[in-house]
Amino acid sequence: MNKEQFQLFPIKTDINKLDHLSIGGCDTNELVKEFGTPLYIYDEFTLTEMCKNFSKEFKSRYPNTEIVYASKAFSNLSIFKILEHQGLGLDVVSGGELALAESINFPNKKIYFHGNNKTRKELKQALIYQVGKIVVDNFYELNLLNELAKDLKITQDITLRLSPGIDPHTHTYTTTGTLDSKFGFSLETGDAAKAFDTANRMSNLQLTGIHFHLGSPIFELEPYAVAIDKVLEFISKLELDNQKQNLLEFSPGGGFAIGYIEKELPPPISSYAETITKTLKDGCSKYGLAQPKLVIEPGRSIIGRAGIALYKTGSIKVIPNVRKYISVDGGMGDNIRPALYDSKYHAVVANRMSDTRKDIITIAGKFCESGDILVKDINMPIINPEDIIAIPASGAYNSAMSSNYNMNPRPPILLVNEGKAKLIRRGETYKDLIQYDIV
Ligand code: LLP
């Protein structure tokens, strides 16, 4: 593997004496023998390094920064514990994600509750757990939340989710901050200004700041700079009973990219940090605003590189002059991203790492859909049945968006560190699949 390819894998990746892929000091082939395939492995060292990196790069430039992990990227109790230990907060978008956090007593004040249609039940759950902030998305929620907080006789801190109308140039399905988006109060339509006015008049809500999220993954820095400046200018011009809006918190969301293939590596975290903190500082002085707390919400960039997926190869179909399909024992059930977003991935043969490249193949999944292709037309060694394929950068939005399509059980998930592997989610069984149905 070359230097760029190593950057796609967890930091503690090696090729051992047996020519096997090793992650966190564990031979992946041995793990496959013990746990089977498909198998997901997370490297603890990479995870903690990413947390430290974000902390260092942002706080050295802007000490008043809070890092909040977007748990939709991968929700797991062991992972939440590690993140809590690293001092991160948690962004949740459902009662389910919140329930996981509650089950390990995740510090409530470090929880941000997001979502464009939080239900009455979910809002109540968040109020009762006394989460730090509820990020209000729309007028319906503003009224409903105030009413619920009043019933419970509490005052809830909120921030407003704004839609700044900036295109971050990513997949349309994961673009969120443009005019035609279901998320947030639009600056363009006048809703944002109206939302400040309404929120400030709510008896049981305390407006503390704003949030926006442009999309994900964002490989460019410019959209962050343009959006931050635009939102600060907007805030400075708000006329609220002749008072300036006092911003205690400012969040430009998450969306920081990771490398999936060697040809598309993202800017380093330091560049995102430099752009965001500089634009925020410059904007505050330009528009005469006090510097607020900066809240960033990385999901993918915290957990994505830490995870790899392992599969075993099975059937091989050669269509002369067209394509060679190598099928593996997982696919769109554990990674929907290629089918949904046309996402590109790298792959290696984990049991013959130094084998030189001789073939162009397409790695297909086992699900009953022609679109179930994990990697299209990739250079790889000649592959035989029962080889082990490893796909890096699989830590974010794979397991998180997994399904039981075709009644395939979800794979087990391991956490590796210093040569030890720990099961952090057991694999599903057929019994698990059957248990919900009633005859
Ligand atoms: N904050 C908010 C409000 C968000 O909506 C998201 C992601 C994040 C933070 C974290 O974004 P990240 O840092 O992970 O890029 N399923 C898609 C990604 C959807 C992202 C949804 N929101 C994918 O697999 O690429």
Image (cartoon, rainbow, N blue to C red):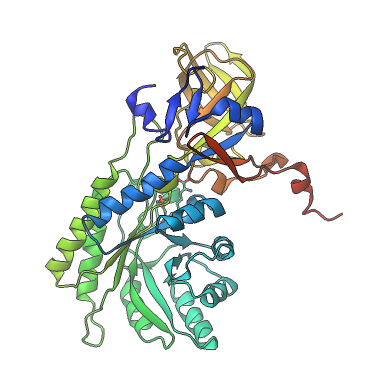
Q: Which quadrant holds the N terminus?
A: top left
Q: In terms of depth relative to the viewer, which is nearer, 44 or 195?
A: 44
Tell me the residue at 58%/42% (across/down): 422
- Image quadrant in which you'd find residue 267: top left
Q: Is residue 52 among what the camera can see?
A: yes
Towards the viewer: 400 or 227: 400
- Residues 174 and 209: in front is 209
Q: Is residue 310 above or below residue 128?
A: above
The answer to which quarter of the image holds residue 4 is top left
Q: Nearer the viewer, residue 66 or 272?
A: 66
Residue placed at 23% from the left, 81% from the top? 239
Q: Give coordinates of residue 303: x percent, y percent.
A: 44, 46
Q: Quadrant of residue 178?
A: bottom left
Q: Is residue 204 left or right of residue 211?
A: right
Residue 245, percent from left and from top: 25, 78
Residue 57 position (above or below residue 140): above
Q: Is residue 315 above or below residue 173?
A: above
Q: Residue at x 43, y 35 (%)?
A: 10
Image location of residue 232, percent across then percent down? 22, 67
Residue 221 placed where, x, y %?
Answer: 25, 48
